[in-house]
Image: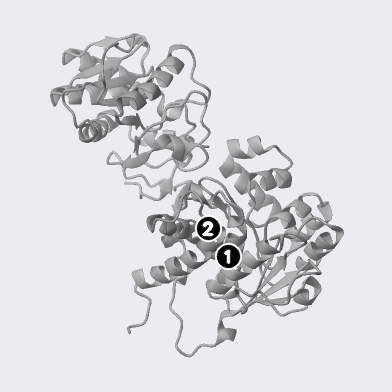
């Protein structure tokens, strides 16, 4: 049985399926689909529309259709393929369906109001845009589900969605529910996946494979050993010095947000090195922050350094990045620090040679500059892009976006599922940088600090939405206090807080 957090690419799943050819996997998939379909189709007076494709996904659909008919649901199954050309298991499923009295039609019936629509067209096998009648059926399924206000259930993966990358072709099923088989697939959780999969459930089909997963969904288990309460015998020096470099003219707020996030996630001291010569000497809303110019910060003894929030790309900013890379402390590179790095082979070489850990938190456009490709290239292969950044720059990388991909220097990768669309607002990345810097300052290893910072960032935004704040109008500043709340909650949930 695969663990719920494990992610397998399509090539790995094909290999796993080959291990278990003697087991009735298609029948089990059909049963799982029928069970969920039965729960979703609450009005027995409205028929279920099932779209069956020309491959094994169609076989799953035939199995589900047969079982639903046995349970006295009204079922209309649309199939335009040649039964003689179906794969072996799918052909057997088709025969069982027909022998049980089932019939198919090549057209979606008119004049019906559907109680449920089931997408069994392509699953994980599609690598290009659907065409001809299949494209028409996908468009019709989306329209009919909206018209009839009924659930749309995708089998294994919404048809039109790349199960590995999360890229949605046109057209693509927009499911309200997806039941995915054997294990979770990365494309369901990143890029376009969350907008097309709806609520995801995993049916493992009784498989207990020994094959190592390709990646994992990011949960607190990835950094659980470092969620520890503080000793009573502590002082501010126990929790490290974090430095934030940035805050050029008209961009001071970015550095302040990062600094406030670092302070409220527990760094003992937080210093801001600002490039704006007119910057105030104190943050009136957070006077605990120690503000100074960038050169003074670079001379300060630090346990962690973040470079980039509001940095700009002036000659002075380039010099600051160069000096920051000489630091012996772990460093988080974000925003304009990444843009400067992308344009300088000398700085890239400097990053590769660093002995202390380097962490990068690019959004897709910054990642594209760092890799010398287009944003489209990055988004079409978010996992590969994150892994290549980690390899090329010897850095731990968080490729931000829907389903942030975290890749480590070791080659491991995760997809983060916390967070919501309210985070598409200014300053969110600066807060993330500050959270990571705070954990590094407190002695967390670089990989775990990045994983925890990314997951916490999204969880804090989700916490606010649960409290009725956002999604629309959610601000980065609000996420700072919520991150503190969630982080301390994690300590309490896991039993690490001392007894009161």
Q: Which color scheme is applied? A: one colour
Question: Taking 467 as reference, is 45 above or below it?
Answer: above
Residue that appears at 35% across and 41% down: 199
* Residue sitting farthest toward the right: 315
Q: Nearer the viewer, residue 423 or 374?
A: 423
Task: Say if mark 2 contacts mark 1, CB within 8 Å.
Answer: yes
Residue that appears at 76% across and 67% down: 324
Q: Secondary structure at mark 2?
A: helix
Q: x and y percent of residue 386 in the render?
A: 61, 47
Q: Nearer the viewer, residue 290 or 362?
A: 290
Q: x and y percent of residue 422 in the render?
A: 50, 50
Question: Taking 176 as reference, is 220 above or below it?
Answer: below
Q: Residue 496 is drawn in which quadrant?
A: bottom left
Residue denoted by label 2: 454
Q: x and y percent of residue 25 in the render?
A: 29, 32
Placement of the C terminus among the 4 image quadrants? bottom left
Residue denoted by label 1: 436
Q: Nearer the viewer, residue 75 or 156?
A: 75
Residue count near mark 2 (Cα–Cα under 10 Å), binned few <14, some 14–19, many ≥20: many
Q: Is residue 23 left or right of residue 361?
A: left
Question: Taking 365 as reference, is 304 above or below it?
Answer: below
Q: x and y percent of residue 126 in the render?
A: 47, 25
Q: Residue 106 is drawn in which quadrant?
A: top left
* Residue sitting farthest toward the bottom: 233
Question: Taking 302 as reference, is 70 above or below it?
Answer: above
C-alpha gap between disc 2 and disc 1: 8 Å
Residue that appears at 49% across and 67% down: 481
Q: Is residue 123 left or right of residue 302?
A: left
């Amino acid at each position: 049985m695969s663990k719920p957090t494990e992610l397998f690419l399509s090539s790995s799943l094909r290999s796993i399926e080959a291990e278990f050819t003697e087991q009735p996997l298609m029948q089990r998939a059909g049963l799982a689909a029928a069970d969920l379909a039965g729960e979703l189709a609450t009005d027995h007076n409205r028929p279920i529309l099932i779209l069956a494709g020309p491959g094994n996904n169609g076989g799953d659909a035939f199995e589900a259709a047969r079982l639903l008919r046995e349970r006295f649901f009204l079922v209309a199954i649309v199939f335009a393929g040649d039964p003689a050309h179906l794969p072996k298991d799918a052909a057997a499923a088709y025969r069982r369906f027909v022998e049980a009295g089932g019939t198919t039609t090549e057209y979606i019936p008119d004049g019906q109001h559907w109680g449920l629509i089931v997408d069994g067209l392509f699953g994980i096998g599609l690598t290009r845009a659907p065409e001809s009648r299949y494209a028409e059926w996908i468009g019709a399924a989306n329209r009919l589900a909206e018209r009839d206000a009924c659930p749309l259930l995708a089998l294994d993966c919404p048809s039109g969605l790349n199960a590995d990358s999360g890229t949605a072709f046109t057209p693509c099923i927009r499911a309200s529910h997806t039941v995915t088989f054997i294990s979770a697939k990365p494309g369901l959780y990143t890029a376009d996946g969350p907008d097309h999969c709806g609520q995801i459930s995993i049916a493992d089909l009784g498989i207990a494979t020994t094959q190592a997963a390709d990646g994992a969904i990011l949960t607190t288990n990835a950094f659980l050993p470092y969620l520890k309460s503080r000793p009573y015998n502590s002082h501010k020096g126990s929790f490290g010095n974090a430095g934030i470099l940035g805050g050029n003219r008209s961009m001071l707020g970015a550095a302040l947000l990062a600094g406030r996030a670092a302070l409220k996630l527990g760094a003992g001291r937080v210093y801001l090195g600002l490039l704006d010569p007119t910057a105030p000497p104190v943050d009136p809303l957070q006077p605990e922050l120690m503000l100074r110019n960038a050169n003074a910060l670079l001379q300060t003894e630090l346990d962690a350094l973040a470079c980039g929030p509001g940095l700009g790309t002036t000659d002075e900013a380039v010099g600051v990045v160069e000096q920051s890379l000489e630091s012996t402390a772990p460093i988080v590179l974000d925003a304009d620090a990444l843009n400067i790095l992308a344009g300088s082979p000398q700085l890239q070489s400097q990053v590769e040679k660093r002995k202390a850990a380097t962490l990068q938190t690019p959004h897709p456009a910054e990642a594209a500059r760092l890799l010398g490709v287009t944003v489209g290239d990055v988004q079409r292969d978010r996992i590969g892009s994150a892994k290549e950044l980690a390899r090329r720059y010897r850095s731990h990388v968080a490729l931000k976006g829907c389903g942030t991909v975290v890749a480590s220097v070791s080659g491991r990768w995760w997809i983060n599922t916390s967070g919501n669309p309210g985070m598409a607002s200014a300053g969110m990345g600066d807060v993330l940088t500050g959270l990571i810097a705070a954990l590094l300052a407190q002695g967390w290893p670089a990989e775990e600090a990045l994983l925890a910072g990314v997951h916490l960032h999204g969880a804090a935004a989700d916490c606010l939405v649960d409290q009725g704040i956002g999604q629309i109008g959610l601000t980065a500043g609000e996420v700072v206090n919520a991150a503190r709340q969630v982080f301390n909650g994690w300590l309490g949930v896991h039993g690490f807080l001392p007894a009161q």
